[in-house]
Image: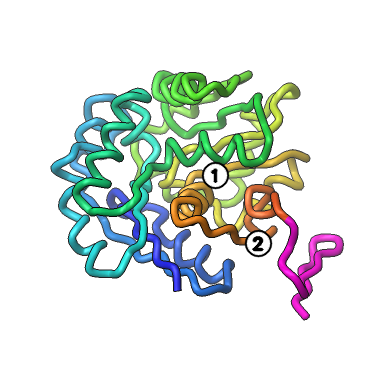
């Protein structure tokens, strides 16, 4: 069994993770531990406070007791608002506190873009425009070209968590760009696990979503590679395991 511990701020789209666990249909467990949000508002200072060492440390001991082999700070905004160097220090502090490999959703996006072989991306964000731009700058600091950035002006994670499939698809379409090789939806408060494959079919290109890349990053930290095309191109970059085939979107396991 592989156990990836997740630190997740508040309560918005955390039910994506047990859904992903079921979709993986494997010996993977994704225990989730909530951290305090403080003020639920998409402003830089509030988001930096949400990702402070003190708030994150509160969930580390429970995560260790759950037998986690690695941990991911399952929050994009609460990491990229520190900039690349600050986000590095954030996960390094987490790793020292937990005694485990650690990462965050922001770094997960950068690593996932490289995994799918993309170099140019579009950002389709629920954040206000100024916050979405900070995410684009984080990606650019990682050597990724951002050809378009769209913010949606949503102020709270609570509102984002209430978005349905229609709104998620509208966001992805509106944020796409002809020059983008992939589209990124960066908010972990957004329910996306059930729609990744549909989003990719709709846009005709890979789509990376926050909760999807968070799980993939945790597995990367422990060197696990899972093939599950229902979770999109990111989980289908390698050959399927023996006895598994896919034809026209239907996976057959012998």
Residue indicated by mark 2: 228
Say whether residue 68 is left or right of residue 212. Answer: left
Report x, y in % for residue 219. Answer: 49, 56
- Towards the viewer: 19 or 164: 19
Q: Nearer the viewer, mark 2 or mark 1?
A: 2
Residue 159's disc is none
Q: Residues within 10 Å of mark 1 (few under 14, many from 20)?
A: many
Report x, y in % for residue 1. Answer: 45, 74
Range of residues picked out in magenta: 239-254
Q: Is residue 245 magenta?
A: yes
Q: Residue at x 24, y 30 (%)?
A: 48
> In the rendered image of this protein, does residue 228 appear above or below residue 104?
below
> In the rendered image of this protein, does residue 64 appear above or below residue 12?
below
Q: Residue at x 13, y 42 (%)?
A: 54
Q: Where, quadrant-wise, is the C terminus in this rendering? A: bottom right
Q: Are marks 2 and 1 in contact (CB under 8 Å)?
A: no
Report x, y in % for residue 99. Answer: 24, 53
Tell me where residue 89 sits by quadrant: top left
Task: Compute the Cα span from label 2 to label 1.
Answer: 15 Å
Tally of marks: 2
Lower position in the chain sequence, tag 2 or tag 1? 1
> In the rendered image of this protein, does residue 21 appear above or below residue 204?
below
Query: Dot 1 lies on which element?
Result: strand
């Amino acid at each position: 069994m592989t156990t990836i511990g997740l630190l997740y701020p508040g309560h918005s789209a955390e039910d994506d993770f047990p859904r992903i666990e079921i979709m993986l249909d494997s010996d993977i467990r994704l225990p989730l531990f909530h951290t305090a949000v403080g003020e639920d508002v998409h402003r830089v200072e509030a988001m930096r406070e949400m990702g402070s060492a003190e708030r994150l440390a509160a969930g580390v001991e429970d995560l260790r007791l759950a037998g986690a082999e690695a941990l991911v700070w399952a929050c994009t905004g609460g990491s990229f608002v520190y900039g690349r160097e600050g986000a590095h220090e954030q996960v390094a502090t987490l790793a020292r506190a937990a005694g485990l490999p650690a990462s965050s959703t922001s770094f997960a996006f950068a690593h996932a873009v490289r995994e799918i072989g993309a170099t140019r991306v579009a950002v389709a964000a629920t954040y206000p425009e100024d916050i979405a731009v900070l995410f684009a700058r984080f990606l650019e600091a990682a050597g990724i070209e951002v050809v378009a950035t769209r913010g949606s002006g949503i102020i709270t994670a609570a509102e984002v968590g209430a978005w349905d499939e229609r709104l998620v698809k509208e966001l992805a379409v509106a944020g796409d760009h002809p020059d983008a090789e992939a589209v990124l939806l960066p908010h972990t408060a957004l329910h996306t696990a059930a729609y990744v494959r549909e989003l990719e079919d709709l846009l005709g290109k890979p789509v990376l979503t926050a909760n999807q890349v968070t799980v993939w990053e945790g597995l990367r930290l422990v060197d696990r590679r899972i093939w599950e095309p229902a979770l999109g191109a990111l989980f289908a970059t390698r050959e399927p395991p023996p006895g598994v085939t896919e034809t026209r979107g239907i996976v057959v396991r012998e």
